[in-house]
Image (cartoon, helix red, strand yellow):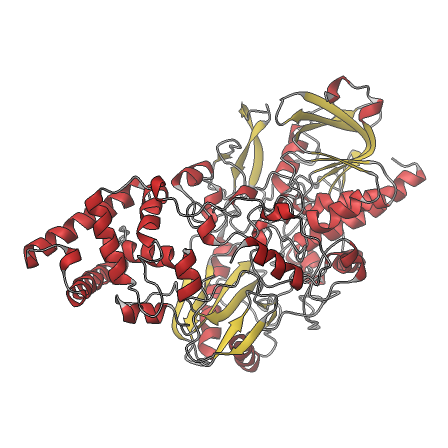
Amino acid sequence: MNLNIRGIEENTYDAIVVGSGISGGWAAKELTEKGLKVLVLERGRDVKHIVDYTTANLPPWESPHLNRASQTQLAQQHVQKRTGYTVNETHGQFFVNDVENPFIEKKRFDWMRGYHKGGRSITWGKQTYRLSPMDFEANSKDGISNPWPIRYDDLAPWYSYVEKFIGVSGSKEGLEQLPDGEFQPPMDLTIAEKDLKAAVETKWKGRKVIPGRVAHLTNPTDEQKALGRSSCNYRNLCMRGCPFGAYFSSQAATLPAAERTGNMTLRPHSVVHSIIYDDAKGKATGVRVIDELTMQPMEFFAKVIFLNASTVPSTGILLNSKSSRFPNGMDESGALGHYLMDHHLGVGASGILDTHADKITYGRRPNGFYIPRYRNVIEKGTTGNYIRGFGYQGGASRQGWSREIDGFGADFKKQMTSFGPWTVSMGGFGECLPYYENTISLSPDKKDKWGLPLIVADAEFKQNERNMRIDMMNDAAEMLDAMGAKNINAHNNEPWIGLGIHEMGTARMGDSSKNSVLNKWNQVWGAPNVVCTDGAAMVSAGCQNPSLTYMAMTARAVNHIVEELKKGNL
Amino acid sequence: MDRRELVKIMSVMVGGTIALPESVFARIAEPLDITKAKFFTGKQRKLVAAIADCIIPKTDTPGAVEAGVPAWIEILVQDCLTPDDQKIITGGLASLEADVKQKFNSTFAKLTVAQQIALLTEMEKAAKETEAKNRAAKIQAPRAFIRQFKELTKFCFVNSEIGGTQAFEFIITPGRWDGAMDLKPGQKAYSF
């Protein structure tokens, strides 16, 4: 099949969605369910649900190196390995080959990428939180950067809509800084986590320790069952792909929903080069694509184009889409490529408990506890007058074989094969401010093998984040101390942008074409039929895991765009 | 546990609501293949086996040697360690044997278990003291031979089929979650 010689008509759809990850899957589902013929362009290979989760049931001894990465694999994934957990023999295939997909680090950028159908929705952490009213008001209140053009109430019904479809396990808590959602039953805290909860909530009024809110089914709806999804089996092998479809991914939920409408065409191996803009019409007409395998250039056309390539590639496509109207990429404000954010982490504490020696856990819960933000909500920050705040994720469980045990021989073996003490740990997720000078740009001369200019990353955390991290470390240690933990070990590692895998911003929304790339419906100013609803659109970061917000923004934007199409406004 | 057993268990877990295609399990196992290990000399192999056996001996459950750990160690040292760490392993093996020769005029494998344990314990103690000093002085240094070798032995044992399923409890699909279950007397820790 050689698509480029087909007529324009054959390559024309109602809508094109660039990317099949967590937000692209949502765009595909919503657009097809509203009756549009949709072409989904995925830059990488196909990954079929269940069938292509080839390692899902592999015990370690059936991996060539007991599931440890070889030096050969580490060399191929020299950036991906920086997390310490993304590169191994059972889920390393869902992260890119860094040698084949180079980029330029003016400053270190730990860019974790999944270039295949489903993107990072296969490997995401699944923690699922709403932003709160105060998050949408934060920039206005603090007088920094740009205000959000929407408020919590604009997104609230779409949060509900998305949560009902994807399935979120969690508890209702009635917190203003972390609004409740549509929840399936929560995953119980461990007995030691309940001790932490009691200690923290007694000592600090208003701080809360709650079960993590996670996109796993614990009581599936008929709609979820009809898609072939079932309840979580507590394997915690999620990153290999879930044969039960128990956690939300594009493969398990949105893509099959789009598929069953009969309106979706999904084309893998389709690297989008740029958007085709018609100066006379004042809108886009299609996209230029390079076939990943044959290098064949192609063009596809549609009335509306959704950009869901993930934060940095979506911005890269906008920057690379040059026309006489947009000589420097699709932006008039100067904001495109700026204000890159991520959550900063690698800071927290752990400790040992001498309680509950007669209790263990059963099952591997793909979740833990969550401590919603309290700094600069109910308690002021204590270090350096920082603004915004942080949440914690953590867990308490029995130590196992990997704990450090001195000695050798039968005594050592006896200890190693027995349960160790309970251990508790927590790590902070801190909000990063949007800084103009934290940028993504395109290399003026260097290109990848598909002829796309290399992405240049130049971003870093700054003083507000560094001040916040002192509280993040000390508060964690104090809360563990309050529950009677021993051997408390507090840490504050050097943070690098990207490691949170929550990179966002660089094509922000706003209320004017003078200061933003996207309007309040995620439409590109000056190209209203180009819509970007992934992390690139974010105006501020909050400290909550962001994927739910991308999904809700996408469903909201599709609804608006389809209304506009019906009205003939596009 | 073989694959058919897993299919059965998974089918029970989902209450038969999902037909799992056989292709999920189509990946052919790559069991331990000793012919892939080409890193150590014959002498080094014997010493590796003797140390691994001292670290995790056969008791009421199989030990490191029964679990095939020496071959796994060789494959991991060969393919997963950096050249620098490989040198720490081969250098450590040589200096351990030289030490035994000097102190006992013997080889490590021929020492009594008590002598072997005493020797390794002394090495571990010294290595941990050095680590503590380095930490205090904020010096970054690679981990000593005994520390790396013991970690490798643990890792290979717990992730081997025999070690992981006989000396530990191995459950790939628990099916439920309990955050406060009673510990039964003598219950083995989880390997997975």
Examine the rendered structure and indicate whether residue A145 appears above or below residue A475: above
Q: Position of residue B8 (x, y in %)?
A: 62, 59
Asked whether the viewer can see residue A284, the reply is: no
Which image quarter holds the C terminus of chain A?
top right
Classify the position of the N terminus of chain A by image quarter: top right
Disc count in the image? 0
Left or right placement of residue B168 versus residue A49 in this view: left
Query: Quarter-wise, where is residue A528 in the image?
Result: top right
Q: What is the residue that sits farthest to the right in this orientation?
A: A567
Q: Which residue is drawn at 52% across and 77% down?
A: A196
x then y, percent, for residue A501: 56, 49
Viewer-closest of B66 and B118: B66
Using the image as rendered, state which of residue A238 and residue A377 is in the foreground.
A238
Residue A269 visible somewhere in the drawing: yes
In terms of depth relative to the viewer, which is nearer, A103 or A365? A365
Q: Position of residue A424 (x, y in %)?
A: 47, 70
Question: Which picture quadrant has residue A44?
Answer: top right
Asked whether, in this view, residue B140 is left or right of residue A471, the answer is left
**Percent of width and height locating residue B93:** 20, 50
Q: Quadrant of residue A336?
A: top right
Q: Which residue is drawn at 57% across and 50% down?
A: A240
| Image vertical order of residue B87 relative to residue A363, above or below | above
Q: Position of B112 compared to A215: left or right?
A: left
Q: Is residue A505 left or right of residue A392?
A: right
Viewer-side residue, A413 vs A515: A413
Q: Which residue is drawn at 66% across and 63% down?
A: B12
